[in-house]
Image (cartoon, rainbow, N blue to C red):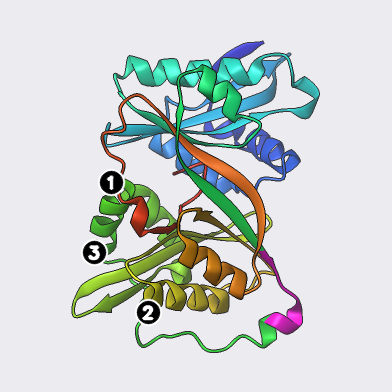
Amino acid sequence: MRLRAMTMADIPAGLLLNQSAGWNQTAADWERFLKASPEGCFVAEVHRHVCGTVTTISYENRFAWVGMVLVDPQQRNQGIGTKLLETAIQHLDDRTIATIKLDATPQGRPLYEKMGFVAEYEIERWTLRRTMTDLSAAGPSREEILSGSFPDSIVETDREAFGADRSYLLKSLHRNAPDFTMEIDDSDVLQGYTLGRRGLFADHLGPWIARNNSAARLLLEAFLVRSTRKTLVVDCVEANSAALGLLASYGFTYSRLLTRMYRGPNTYPGRPDMLCAILGPEFG
């Protein structure tokens, strides 16, 4: 096995791995990783065949994110995933980034705990599967209060909610799916916003941020109208019972559990109380 830095030429191999795992990432997502961290994404090769990946992104050096820990099903149980994760952590340690975060599946959590990660809070993936009849029956979106623009207020509020600036990612999402960028203002105060992605098999809502239940509902309703895909996914913060209730009321069903974890001091936790849904487990 050989470990090396990932390059743009490896994107097709990365796509094959996330397809085989049933993950929703696209080539545009892999490009985001590599542009944000050209020296911090890695692949494992066996006989020059890419059989594993891991990505890292640093957010203002406040903390870094680890994601896309993928191993070819035919090469599993050989320690490849562990070696990739160790390589990513060593890379971040060498850059003296004190805090590393990730979103763990139940299967991966024991490994991360052995490496010093501790739980911060739980995240639930909820999925909606619609028929063509459902799509044709969708009502109008609330254009009078929701905007497709990308104001600085979103960047500022997102930094408060997430704990660090990630405007590069937000602007990239907006360029690819501007109709999912929505905001609600009240007396010039941002009450909530959303962005979204058109993934491999589903449209993904996130981040979904709201200061009150009314804003959360309006943003979700508008996303349901603006998305034309049959399958929608949302990674909702488990402690936000109002957001979970909204998803259930619109027909979403629970799919899986994730645990947000961190290694090192959690100096910049953000505002989890503002989070209805995260951007995604691969980005934070």
Residue hosting label 1 = 165
The local crowd at label 3, few if under 14, some if 14 to 19, many if 20 or more residues have their Cα within 10 Å, is some
The disc label shown at residue 13, or none: none
Residue hosting label 3 = 153
Q: Position of residue 164 (x, y in %)?
A: 28, 43
Q: Circle 1 — which element?
A: loop
Q: Circle 3 — which element?
A: helix
Q: Measured along the vertical axis of the image, is residue 267 above or below residue 176?
A: above
Q: Circle 2 — which element?
A: loop
Kindly give the residue lying farthest to the right in the view shown: 74
The local crowd at label 1, few if under 14, some if 14 to 19, many if 20 or more residues have their Cα within 10 Å, is many
Residue hosting label 2 = 146
The residue that appears at 41% across and 65% down in the rendered structure is 194
Residue 189 shown left or right of residue 198 in the figure: left
Q: Where, quadrant-wise, is the N terminus in this rendering?
A: top right
Please name whichever residue, 52 or 78, is drawn nearer the observer in this view of the structure.
78
Kindly give the residue lying farthest to the top in the view shown: 1
Which amino acid type corresponds to the residue marked 3 in the rendered image?
Ser
Residue 50 shown left or right of residue 63 in the figure: right
Residue 157 shown left or right of residue 93 in the figure: left
Label pair 1/3, CB-CB below 8 angstroms: no
Q: Which residues are magenta?
A: 128-134
Q: Measured along the vertical axis of the image, is residue 276 above or below residue 26?
A: below
Q: Position of residue 5 (x, y in %)?
A: 51, 21
Magenta stretch contains residue 99: no
Quadrant hosting residue 133: bottom right
Magenta stretch contains residue 130: yes
Sequence-wise, the earlier of marks 1 and 3 is 3
Label pair 2/3, CB-CB below 8 angstroms: no
Please name whichever residue, 198 or 247, is drawn nearer the observer in this view of the structure.
247
Quadrant hosting residue 158: bottom left
